[in-house]
Image (cartoon, rainbow, N blue to C red):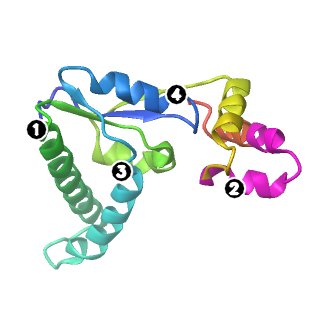
């Protein structure tokens, strides 16, 4: 991968249009964008595995060095995986859009210092409408805690979800 153009991460809540944006980006001659890969949680788990394994080797002398070893290993693994994917698609750059990546920004910013972030924001009522239309036989797992709190009113549950996403993550 060209060092001047790192990966792109789409940050959004569910039903915000991230899939459409992913499809549009995937049509670009140099960008590939697979479906949800959950790279944030992968980076989080790989970091802990690397920190507790190779980060604890006797050659690692300080906490800062241990952290650096773990970050470097996560970067090597994830870039290896994703760059192989991009190369297989004949493209130079990759994009990932899992909605839970926002929960792992701390590790992702360390692993991908060259990463770029697209914050996708959609009006609350549009998200509600999309969730209602997408849920005739059930609802997305991200909404479960909100539906549990408001089982009598799905619309109110989705609004609470949207408000919580905006309160906790005002940049999406």
Q: Relative to the observer, which residue lies in front, 82 or 22? A: 22
**Range drawn in magenta:** 141-160
Left or right: residue 169 versus residue 77 is: right
- Given the current orientation, which residue lies at the most extreme right position? 152
- 156 falls in the magenta region: yes
The residue to which callout 2 is attached is 144
Could you say whether the residue bearing mark 1 is in a helix, strand or loop?
helix
Left or right of 135 in this view: 75: left
Residue at the front extreme of this rendering: 137
Answer above or below: position of 101 versus 71. Answer: above
- At 25% from the left and 57% from the top, the residue drawn is 74
Among numbered discs 2 and 1, the one appearing first in the sequence: 1
Answer with mark 1 or mark 4, whichever residue precedes in sequence: 4
Relative to 116, say whether 152 is above or below: below
Foreground disc of the pair 3, 2: 2
Q: Counting other residues with Cα less than 10 Å from the Cα at mark 4, is it few (<14), some (14-19), or many (20 or more)?
A: some
Question: On residue 87, which mark appears?
Answer: 1
Q: CA distance from mark 3 to mark 2?
A: 22 Å
The residue wearing badge 4 is 17
Q: In the figure, residue 25 lies in which quadrant?
A: top left
The front one of 68 and 49 is: 49
């Amino acid at each position: 991968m060209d060092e001047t153009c790192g990966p792109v991460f789409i940050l959004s809540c569910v039903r915000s249009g991230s899939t459409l944006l992913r499809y549009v980006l995937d049509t670009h001659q140099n960008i590939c964008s697979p479906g949800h890969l959950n790279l944030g949680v992968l980076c989080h788990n790989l970091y802990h595995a690397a920190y507790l394994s190779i980060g604890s080797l006797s050659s690692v002398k300080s906490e800062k060095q241990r952290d650096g070893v773990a970050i470097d290993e996560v970067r090597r693994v994830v870039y290896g995986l994703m760059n192989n994917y991009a190369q297989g698609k004949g493209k130079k750059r990759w994009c990932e859009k899992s909605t839970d990546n926002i929960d792992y920004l701390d590790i992702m910013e360390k692993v991908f210092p060259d990463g770029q972030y697209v914050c996708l924001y959609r009006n609350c009522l549009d998200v509600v409408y999309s969730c209602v239309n997408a849920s005739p036989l059930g609802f997305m797992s991200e909404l479960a805690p909100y539906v549990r709190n408001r089982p009598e009113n799905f619309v109110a549950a989705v609004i609470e979800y949207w408000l919580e996403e905006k309160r906790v993550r005002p940049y999406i």
